[in-house]
Amino acid sequence: MLDELGLRQKWRIALVKLYGSTTSPFVRRLRMWLANTEHEFVNLQIFEGKDREILASRNPTLKIPMLEDEQQIIFDSRVIYRYLTEKYGFPSPSWEQENQLTLIDAATDSLVQMFLLKRSDIDTTEDRMYFSLQRERVEATLGQLNVLAEEGHFSQWHYPSMCLFSLIDWIEFRTLVELSNMPNLLSFHDDNCERIEVTATDPRK
């Protein structure tokens, strides 16, 4: 049977625009998923000048990614994925996979918030409720993802696997969390780090 990526290679989407940045894990997952689908990637420096204006003129949430297609704008990576899946008849994720995506999104969202606070010169190591809640959430979700990886839930290269890879690689790229106690996540990362769509979207380049 064709895996999800193999099935998607049979389609050629009319040119849609994906707006984002090369370093965002939420954007990268979509770039990898769209690797074999015709689209335009618009790389934005979302905190600077004209790129900030472009983002604000199209998306009042001021967040990336966003997708422009058929004179409409779709916000949020989860919604963009659902939109393209439904529009082109790609397989929908199972409810089990939806839960996996929620775990991945929760960890990513908490880490993004802590990363932005750190870049704003706020000491996130302080013993404050907000910081403690984010750390607790990251530890719990990564722990569960480590168990799921051990059970083989990400052995196939499908959208949840791409989302997980984007998260783990972003953690490594930004040195956000020590993952030495998450051997299954590290093995998963090592097993997939040479894929063409992974190397082509490497934020380090």
Image (spheres, grey):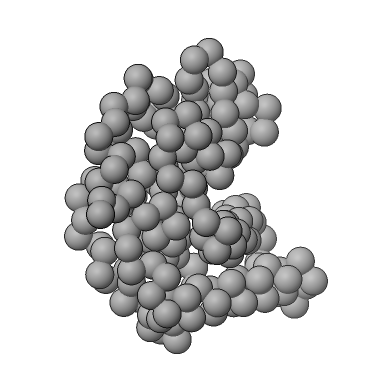
Which of 31/91 is in front?
91
* Quadrant into which the N terminus falls: bottom left
- Using the image, determine if residue 18 lies above or below residue 193: above
Residue at 57% in and 39% down: 79
Residue at 48% in and 20% down: 69
Q: Residue furthest bottom?
A: 181
Q: Position of residue 68 (x, y in %)?
A: 49, 22
Please tell me in which quadrant of the rendered image residue 180 appears: bottom left
Residue at 68% in and 68% down: 134
- Using the image, determine if residue 194 lies above or below residue 137: above
Q: Is residue 74 visible?
A: yes
Q: Position of residue 21 (x, y in %)?
A: 43, 39
How many numbered marks are there?
A: 0
Q: Position of residue 11 (x, y in %)?
A: 29, 31
Please tell me in which quadrant of the rendered image residue 38 appears: top left
- Using the image, determine if residue 45 lies above or below residue 53: below
Decide if residue 56 is on the left or right side of residue 104: right
Decide if residue 78 is on the left or right side of residue 3: right
- Using the image, determine if residue 56 lies above or below residue 176: above
Q: Is residue 19 visible?
A: no
Q: Position of residue 25 (x, y in %)?
A: 45, 51
Q: Residue furthest top?
A: 71
Q: Residue furthest front?
A: 1
Decide if residue 136 is on the left or right side of residue 115: right
Which of 37/11 is in front?
11
Please tell me in which quadrant of the rendered image residue 127 appears: bottom right
Residue at 33% in and 49% down: 4
